Amino acid sequence: AHSDGDVIYHSIVDAIFGALTLPDIGQVFQDTDPRWKDVDSSKFMEHAYGVMSRYGYEIGNIDVTLILERPKVAAFKPAMKENIVKLLKTTPGRVNIKARTHEELDSMGELRSLSCHVVLTLLLK
């Protein structure tokens, strides 16, 4: 990853941009631009929030599914949720985080990769 590579934040940013029919995170924050080298992904979330707000939207709901074998993330989910809530200025009741494994199958199951899916809705303010 060119930035810190936070898969959850990157997936949320892509979902926000997609809901607004904007280019994806890789086009907005190009890995050839040295400004984004090793940047904290919370900066991308802050940018996405600003764009979403300028378009007149707020978060309706965010549903995150993190797919990985390890580490087990159950103990971290409350803090992860709290960070998302703060960065996107929403409420805890609008953010859900789930984690699952691939039961030791394919590259995710072999601990060579992970994946994150995000479904979200935006509401007009």
Image: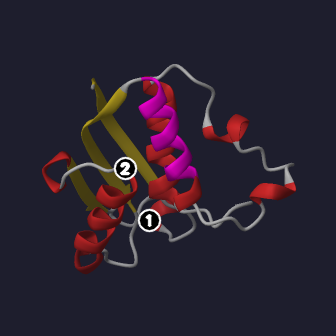
Tag shown at residue 70: none
Mark 2 Cα-neighbour bin, 10 Å: few <14, some 14–19, many ≥20 = some
Residues under labels 2 and 1: Cα distance? 31 Å
The image quadrant where one finds the N terminus is: bottom right
Would residue 38 be seen by someone viewing this image from the given angle?
yes
* Near-viewer residue (98 or 17): 17
The residue at 27%/26% (across/down) is: 125
**Region in magenta:** 44-55
Relative to 53, 63 lies left or right: left
Tag 2 and tag 1, C-beta contact below 8 Å: no
* Near-viewer residue (42 or 76): 42
Circle 1 SS class: helix
* Residue under numbered circle 1: 109
Amino acid type for the residue under numbered disc 1 = Gly
Circle 2 SS class: loop
Q: Is residue 26 above or below residue 18?
A: below
Residue furthest out toward the left: 93
| Lower position in the chain sequence, tag 2 or tag 1 | 2
* Residue under numbered circle 2: 88
Residue 40: percent from the left, percent from the top?
61, 66
* Residue 53 covered by magenta stretch: yes
The residue at 35%/28% (across/down) is: 57
The residue at 78%/63% (across/down) is: 37
Would residue 106 be seen by someone viewing this image from the given angle?
no
* Near-viewer residue (37 or 88): 88
Residue 67: percent from the left, percent from the top?
38, 58
Q: Is residue 125 above or below residue 103?
A: above
Residue 42: percent from the left, percent from the top?
52, 60
Amino acid type for the residue under numbered disc 2 = Leu
Relative to 25, 103 lies left or right: left
Mark 1 Cα-neighbour bin, 10 Å: few <14, some 14–19, many ≥20 = some
* Residue 3 covered by magenta stretch: no
